[in-house]
Image (cartoon, grey):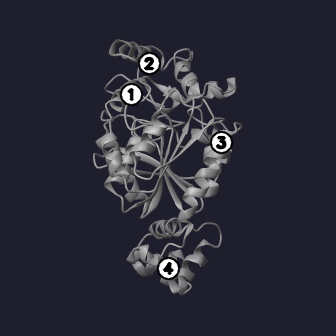
Amino acid sequence: MWGGQGVATKPGRRGRERRTLTPVVAAQVPNQQVRFCRADDGVRIAWARHGCGPPLLIVSCWLSHLQHDWQSPVWRHFLDDLGDLATVVRYDERGFGLSEWEVTDFSLARRLADLEALVEAAGLDRFAVMGMSGGAPVALAYAHAHPDRVSRLVLYGGMAGGGLQQADEAAEEAFLAMIRAGWARPDPLFRRVFTNSFIPDATEQQMEWMDELQRTSTNTENAVCSRVARHATDVRALLPEITTPTLVLHAEGDRVAPGWGPRLAADIPDARLVMLESRNHVLLADEPAWPAFLREVAAFVGEDRAVVPVSHLTDREREILLLAAEGLDNTAIADRLTLSVRTVERHFQNVYLKLGLSGRTARAAAVARVLT
């Protein structure tokens, strides 16, 4: 089964509901490239890249949709403003958005393996990582496993385990029953419980969009199974061993991950904590906490804008740049190296990402770098 706007999902072997989603207006998705890679178990993972500057890989919360988010009065400012600071690479987790929905394993180990596959597919070498909300444990596990690749770690609204879990087992079972009963219903009554927790100070328009995002981004069974798996996740033992420079940002009144910001900052060596004046788990564009968040992230990831050495490029990438320096276009380079033109284009895109280049001058700048 597949998720994604413009795709009608059919009942799977586990009896999932059928959904037909609203088409995306392409003009509302500026400069975004959507691609797919396969995890080592064959599941297709959708990922996207936009913006310019040093690479920033976002490990997002479980509710995401690479295209639908561009139309969002809740998420759009994240995409626009972060894209001005960095080359943003983000993805839909398995079971969500444009990634494959017919899945059963939502464990931390599986999610980490998916992230590792994505990093290779995107051609990332050394990069900053932002772990948001329930994506924070995956970001932490990746930074712990690959300290040589993660230049900086930002944790926003994150947690090391658990999450928005009810007070006891009986209450949690009742909550899961509510998800099963109300997730796919046109009436958003049950989904509004989540919305009120995530963005209590939102406008009615913003809340309605968040209500709809829930059933747009995944189906009922995935919502239940992923919630259960996330509550079994616990990476607290890894925190003292994180060596990556870390910035922790957390809303003071966050209901989804209450109290986690100070705990993360206390347990991660030399982490910096910034508490934001907000009750929203997802900061909204018109609240004072948003420009404060943006200033902190800009200053932190901006330190990665130092010139990346050409030695970080692969032999093939350097070879292609040298041929471009001879005046060959992509077709001629492809013929010389017996590659497809699309492969050559992909190599150039990876070079631009690694070197923090964008725009019409990116090719000339990359060639100049390899010749110096």
Asked if the residue under mark 1 is in contact with the one under mark 2, i.e. CB atoms within 8 Å, the reply is: yes
Q: Amino acid at mark 4?
A: Leu
* Badge 1 element: helix
Tell me where residue 173 appears, x and y as whole percent: 36, 15
| Residue 227 badge | 1
Q: Is residue 323 visible?
A: no
Pair 2/3: label in front: 3
* Badge 2 element: helix
Q: Earlier in the sequence, mark 1 or mark 4?
A: 1
User: CA gap, disc 1 to disc 4?
Assistant: 46 Å
Pair 2/4: label in front: 2
Q: Amino acid at mark 2?
A: Ile
User: CA gap, disc 2 to disc 3?
Assistant: 30 Å
Asked if the residue under mark 4 is in contact with the one under mark 3, i.e. CB atoms within 8 Å, the reply is: no
User: CA gap, disc 2 to disc 4?
Assistant: 53 Å
Please give the name of the residue rendered at 68% of the width and 26% of the height, measured from the top-left corner.
Answer: 205
Please give the name of the residue rendered at 33% of the width and 16% of the height, measured from the top-left corner.
Answer: 169
Quick one: quadrant of the N terminus?
top left
Q: Earlier in the sequence, mark 2 or mark 1?
A: 2
Tell me where residue 43 appears, x and y as whole percent: 34, 44
Q: Amino acid at mark 1?
A: Arg
Tell me where residue 335 appears, x and y as whole percent: 45, 78
Answer with left or right where residue 283 lies relative to residue 121. right
Tell me where residue 329 appears, x and y as whole percent: 55, 78
| Residue 179 badge | 2
Q: Which residue is mark 3?
A: 290
Local crowd at mark 2 within 10 Å, few (<14), some, or many (≥20)? some
Q: Which residue is mark 4?
A: 321
User: CA gap, disc 3 to disc 4?
Assistant: 40 Å
Q: Is residue 74 visible?
A: yes
